Image: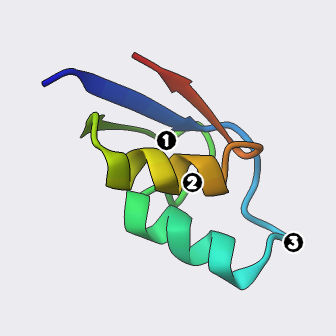
């Protein structure tokens, strides 16, 4: 299975509570933080919800 790297590029300040919870679930707490995930539908769905705050590389 391939992997996805997700980087938080915008601040969490001023975003909706549901988006904060999604970032918490992804483990992205600070700007410029990078996490690696397995490429699956659940992770893709979370990425879609906060796509304006993150940067994705495969």
Question: Which residue is labeled 3 in the image?
Answer: 14
For this rendering, which residue is in front, 1 or 53? Answer: 1
Q: Residue at x 66, y 53 (%)?
A: 50
Question: Which residue is labeled 1 in the image?
Answer: 33
Res. 30 mark: 2
Label 1 crowding class (10 Å Cα cut-off): few <14, some 14-19, many 20+? few
Q: Secondary structure at mark 2?
A: loop
- Classify 47 as above or below 24: above
Instruction: Verify CB contact (< 8 Å) between mark 1 and mark 2.
Output: yes
Q: How many numbered marks, from 0 up?
A: 3
Q: Residue at x 21, y 21 (%)?
A: 2
Q: Quadrant of the C terminus?
A: top left
Looking at the image, residue 40 sits to the left or right of residue 47; the answer is left
Q: Residue at x 39, y 59 (%)?
A: 27
Label 2 crowding class (10 Å Cα cut-off): few <14, some 14-19, many 20+? some
Q: Quadrant of the N terminus?
A: top left
| Residue 12 % position (x, y) | 72, 63
Quick one: which residue is furthest to the left in this view?
A: 1
**Whole-number angstrom distance, CA of label 2 to CA of label 3:** 14 Å
Q: Earlier in the sequence, mark 3 or mark 1?
A: 3
């Amino acid at each position: 299975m391939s992997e996805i790297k997700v980087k938080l590029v915008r601040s969490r300040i001023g975003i909706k509570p549901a988006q904060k919870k999604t970032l918490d679930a992804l483990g992205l707490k600070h700007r410029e933080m990078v996490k690696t995930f397995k490429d699956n539908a659940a992770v893709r769905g979370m990425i879609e919800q906060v796509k304006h705050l993150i940067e994705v590389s495969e």
